[in-house]
Amino acid sequence: MSILVDRLPGSVEIGGAEYQINTGFRTSILFEMLVRNKGIPDQVKIGVMLRQYYPVVPPDEDAAIQKILWFFNCGKKKKKPDERNKTAKSFRKDKALYSFEQDAAMIYAAFLSEYGIDLQDVEDLHWWKFSALFDALPDDTKIKQVMRIRGMDTSGLKKKEIKRLNDLKKYYALEDEETVDSRVKLAKRNARMKEYVRRRMEEVRGKNVGT
């Protein structure tokens, strides 16, 4: 799908049926903030993210979540990493380089200065449009400079430069460096495990009552 020639999606197909989704950029920003919030139980996160995106929640929960990730990633398929020969350096590439919560002011200022877009005033901006604009922000904007610092590798640098870069990394460190995809997969796994334990306990209680 091309943002230049194709109409941006307003719905997704799940189980042969079309389901409307909330396409505004604020929905996806709130989604990312939700999955990074360690104070919310994983089972709660699953329910909230489904209600955030779907006016009518599909019955196939797993498929619905996969479509959320597809939409959040702007239709781009994530390559499944081969971790057998994965180096520490390549693992670092999987880390998040920004946070909509921590970096909100820098992102807001960048959109205003570069595009003349006041994100406070925007009523409806499709998430894929927002993402394209965000990715295309010039390297000299503050947010892109900070993202570059977070992602820089210190190997091969002189000792003095390593200290300077590490100080900057510490200053701009994210509270959570996990990617959204990783966070959602973890939430799904934990929610399934808790549900499995709950059902097993109910089964055990039922057997005890019957004896």
Image (cartoon, rainbow, N blue to C red):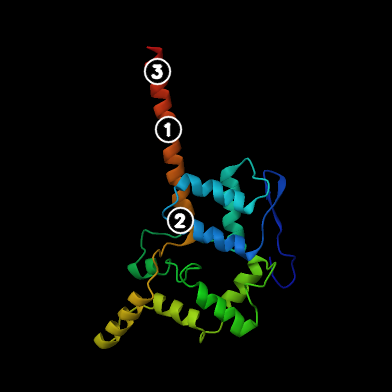
Image quadrant occupied by the N terminus: bottom right
Amino acid residing under circle 1: Arg
Q: Is residue 185 above or below residue 145?
A: above
Residue 45: x, y in percent?
A: 50, 49
Q: Secondary structure at mark 2?
A: helix
Q: Is residue 60 above or below residue 54?
A: above
Looking at the image, tell me whether mark 1 or mark 2 is earlier in sequence order: 2
Marks 1 and 2 sit apart, C-alpha to C-alpha, by: 22 Å
Looking at the image, tell me whether mark 1 or mark 3 is earlier in sequence order: 1
Q: Is residue 185 above or below residue 105?
A: above
Which residue does the image show at 43% across and 26% down from the upper left? Answer: 202
| Residue most extreme to the top | 211
**Residue 183 badge:** 2
Amino acid residing under circle 2: Arg
Marks 3 and 2 sit apart, C-alpha to C-alpha, by: 36 Å
Q: Is residue 206 above or below residue 55?
A: above
Residue 80: x, y in percent?
A: 48, 58
According to the image, label 3 marks what residue? 207
Q: Say whether residue 171 is visible.
A: yes
Q: Quadrant of residue 82?
A: bottom left
Q: Quadrant of residue 57?
A: top right
Residue 208: x, y in percent?
A: 37, 17
